[in-house]
Image: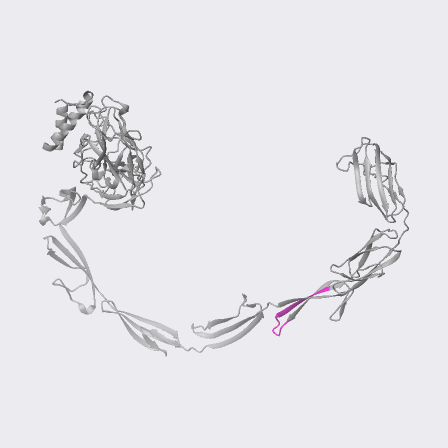
């Protein structure tokens, strides 16, 4: 056979494989087809990875693994084409061979690109993409309307490390079988709602199974459907269910999301899970599976169980290929059957040999026979063991008690004339053919005599009969078997009942103490005193009455000037009086508190300046020992315009006596008096020539000296050092004095000669400015 366009032995091998595969698929079984493929092509099937068994669900289009655009890796090698040939041919030549299917469902539009990177660079991966939008996965069809991309590039010799896929630069839609170094096809411009199926053929470097690959969608802008979360579907029970169960999932989950210690599951009502593993997961826990085996150790006891899914110690539940977690809660139920049981049978010697479940047993003992049977659980064998007990004689004892009139007594045809133990023995053979012996113990009930006295208060009741008078009563007691067992002679004594009632009232304020008990609320006490016969003799009734003792409280304030008269008494000092008033019951009803306040209202008046000159402004200020006082008048009235002010200023015309009349809030009145002398103004300023600020009280400050204490204003006062720096200043004040410190620093001025200028203005308009020097002594 001559094949055009093949490059190297790899291309030849791949082309031959495709033709042979198509031919054999029409005439032979899949097993024989694989065998013939190896013979005809003569390619060794080197197993580089885990080879999955044929007919996996994902080998058919309807069982395609759903991806969501992330990176997906399979460590498996596939063989065959699944249960049906979904894609028998493509525009690139043949169709499926050692194939598996992937599915993408687009939710947001964009481009789709990907790379398929083999785990072993010599592996050869072909792929075809089917636009399955609105198509039946069981009937995909062929041709350009169905297969929109296919690449059957030959990877022998190895180029681009065997990587194939879709990219943004290629414009090719197909690469036919046998072509070399044509790794990429044009991207797919996908719309929302599109569905794409990717068929990937797996070929190893020598034509056998491959070693797995990674498909990576990096660079794609389309968004893919994540699909539903996985769930538990069913649980397969086996003959070994006490040791393990097999769980069927709704979709493939990642092997590395299965916690090997089984912590993704728990047993209810109890049991220890030893581990969990995915079917077809490799030793490194790589790959994916839709079946999980859960093992138990120790083995589970027979009973009903629920296997619940939970978050494992690996921090997650089971994860599907899109990392969707199995939704909780989710669980499956199963039952562990008892397949090994033991039964015990008791027989008579006459029943030997004994037939049990078709087995003939000739002697008694433990485990004398074993019965094997196929159980209802998947054809599992069950085992039942027989313990056989052979009893020679069956014995029994019968106890009877009769009345004297029943003698002689007949029992099982035997007439008994004398009671006692073993009064009769009865021998017989039971239905099983065993000898049985019954022994009769017979006793006769004999009546006894009794005399007694029964008494009561007002009446005596004997066995339902009421007696209100004393008398003798005859009575017979009958036993449970109907025999007279006791003859009684009863002396009935009825004591008269005529109690006396005594009523007493006791009351108190707030509480009552009665018989050592304190009562804070009113209550009625009842007490009964019995006589020597135990009959009621005296009824004591005590009414305890507790009156309220929470008096009302009022407070009065009584005040006056200098002396307070209250209820006939005079008070010269502050005091507090407390009086308690009681009601007719003698309980406190009112507590009155009277606060006596004696007010001694005193006022005084001060002048600023205290030694003014005529024509000077003087501020008169009042103060008192009581707050809230007011002023009623100022004297002499020609000095003051505001007669009701607490303070007044005036231009002093002369010396005079100032009086202020004030009144406290209580109405007390006082007059403050101050004689104010108005000196004559002498407009003279004297400046010292030295001072010593040493704190001795003598010449500690440098200041202008005046004859009068007021009547002037220092307009400004400045002091400079010998370098012309200002060391002190004052303006517009009566008090201008330099203490030897720099005015704007916390720093002493050095002992030295300083220079000053001072300007003074007197109230008569006289102005004087003086310049000079002063010596600061330290």
Q: How is the image coloured?
A: one colour
Q: Magenta region: which residues?
A: 582-596
Instruction: Between residue 54 and residue 492, name the one nearer to us.
Output: 54
The quadrant of the image that shows the C terminus is top right
Residue 737's place in the image compared with 577, above or below, is above
Residue 250 in the image, given as x and y percentages of width and height: 25, 42
Question: Where is 355 relative to 150, above or below?
Answer: below
Main SS, magenta residues: strand
Can residue 492 be seen here? The reply is: yes
Q: Position of residue 53 (x, y in %)?
A: 19, 33
Q: Is residue 92 left or right of residue 362?
A: right
- Which of the two residues, 688 or 514, is positioned nearer the viewer here? 688
Residue at (87% x, 42% y) in the render: 768
Could you say which quadrant of the image residue 238 lies in? top left
Does any portion of residue 296 appear in the rendered image?
A: no
The mark tally for this picture is 0
Residue 589: in magenta span: yes
Residue 358 part of the magenta segment:
no
Eyeballing the image, is 208 above or below 540? above
Residue 246 pos. (x, y %):
23, 40
| 534 with respect to 316 (left or right) | right
Q: Nearer the viewer, residue 772 or 554?
A: 772
- Please state the horizontal and vertical placement of residue 318, each as a whole percent of the image: 30, 39
Figure quadrant of residue 722: top right
The N terminus - image quarter: top left
Vertical order, 736 against 393 (above or below): above
- x 9%, y 49%: residue: 351
């Amino acid at each position: 056979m001559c094949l055009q366009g093949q490059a190297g032995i790899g291309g030849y091998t791949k082309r031959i494989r495709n033709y042979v595969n198509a031919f054999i698929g029409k005439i032979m079984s899949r097993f024989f087809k694989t065998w013939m493929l190896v013979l005809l092509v003569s390619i060794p099937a080197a197993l580089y990875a885990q080879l999955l068994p044929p007919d996996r669900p994902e080998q058919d289009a309807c069982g395609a693994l759903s991806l969501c655009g992330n990176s997906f890796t399979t460590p498996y090698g596939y063989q065959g084409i699944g249960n049906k040939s979904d894609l028998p041919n493509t525009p690139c030549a043949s169709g499926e061979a050692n194939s598996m299917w992937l599915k993408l469902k687009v939710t947001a539009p964009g481009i789709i690109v990907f790379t398929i990177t083999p785990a072993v660079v010599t592996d050869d991966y072909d792929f075809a993409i089917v636009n399955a939008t609105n198509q039946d996965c069981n009937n995909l069809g062929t041709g350009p309307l169905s297969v929109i991309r296919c690449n059957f590039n030959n990877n022998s010799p190895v180029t681009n490390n065997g990587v194939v896929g879709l990219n943004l630069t290629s414009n090719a839609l197909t690469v036919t079988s046998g072509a070399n170094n044509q790794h990429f096809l044009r991207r797919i411009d996908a719309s929302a709602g599109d569905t794409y199926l990717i068929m990937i053929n797996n070929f190893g470097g020598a034509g056998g199974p491959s070693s797995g690959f990674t498909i990576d969608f990096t660079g794609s802008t389309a968004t893919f459907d994540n699909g539903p979360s996985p769930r538990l579907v069913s649980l397969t029970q086996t003959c070994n269910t006490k040791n393990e169960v097999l769980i069927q999932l709704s979709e493939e989950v990642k092997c590395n999301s299965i916690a090997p210690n089984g912590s993704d599951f728990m047993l209810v009502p109890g049991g220890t899970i030893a581990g969990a593993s995915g079917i077809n997961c490799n030793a490194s826990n790589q790959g994916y599976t839709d079946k999980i085996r859960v093992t138990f150790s120790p083995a589970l006891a027979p009973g009903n169980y629920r296997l619940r899914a939970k978050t494992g110690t690996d921090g997650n539940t089971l994860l599907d290929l899109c990392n969707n977690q199995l939704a909780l809660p989710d669980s499956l139920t199963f039952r562990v059957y008892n397949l090994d049981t033991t039964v015990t049978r008791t027989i008579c010697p006459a029943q030997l040999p004994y037939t049990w479940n078709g087995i003939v047993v000739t002697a008694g003992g433990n485990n004398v026979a074993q019965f094997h049977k196929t159980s209802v659980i998947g054809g599992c064998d069950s085992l039942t063991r027989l313990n056989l007990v052979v009893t020679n004689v069956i014995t029994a004892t019968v106890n009877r008690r009769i009345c004297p009139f029943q003698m002689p007594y007949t029992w099982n045809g035997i007439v008994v004339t004398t009671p006692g133990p073993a009064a009769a023995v009865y021998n017989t053979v039971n239905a099983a053919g065993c000898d049985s012996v019954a022994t009769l113990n017979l006793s006769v009930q004999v009546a006894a005599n009794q005399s007694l006295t029964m008494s009561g208060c007002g009446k005596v009741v004997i066995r339902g009969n009421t007696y209100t008078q004393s008398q003798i009563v005859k009575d017979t007691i009958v036993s449970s078997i109907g025999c007279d067992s006791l003859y009684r002679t009863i002396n009935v004594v009825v004591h008269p009942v005529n109690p006396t009632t005594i009523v007493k009232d006791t009351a108190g304020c707030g509480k009552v103490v009665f018989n050592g008990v304190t009562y804070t609320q009113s209550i009625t006490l009842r007490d009964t005193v019995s006589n020597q016969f135990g009959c009621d003799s005296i009824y004591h009734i005590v009414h305890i009455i507790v009156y309220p003792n929470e008096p009302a409280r009022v407070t009065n304030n009584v005040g006056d000037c200098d002396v307070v008269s209250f209820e006939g008494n005079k008070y010269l000092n502050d005091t507090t009086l407390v009086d308690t008033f009681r009601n007719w019951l003698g309980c406190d009803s009112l507590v009155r508190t009277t606060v006596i306040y004696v007010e001694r209202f005193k006022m005084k008046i001060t002048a600023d300046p205290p030694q003014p000159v005529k024509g000077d402004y003087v501020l008169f200020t009042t103060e008192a020992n009581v707050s809230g006082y007011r002023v009623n008048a100022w004297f002499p009235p020609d000095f003051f315009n505001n007669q009701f002010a607490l303070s007044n200023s005036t231009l002093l015309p002369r010396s005079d006596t100032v009086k202020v009349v004030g009144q406290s809030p209580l109405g007390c009145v006082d007059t403050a008096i101050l004689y104010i002398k108005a000196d004559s103004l002498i407009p003279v300023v004297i400046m010292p020539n030295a001072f010593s600020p040493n704190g001795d009280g003598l010449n500690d400050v440098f200041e202008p000296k005046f004859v009068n204490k007021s009547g002037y204003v220092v307009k400004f006062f400045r002091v400079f050092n010998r370098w012309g720096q200002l060391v002190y200043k004052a303006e517009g004040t009566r008090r201008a004095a330099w203490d030897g410190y720099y005015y704007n620093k916390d720093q002493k001025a050095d002992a030295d000669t300083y220079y000053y200028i001072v300007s003074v203005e007197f109230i008569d308009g006289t102005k004087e400015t003086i310049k000079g020097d002063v010596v600061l002594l330290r």
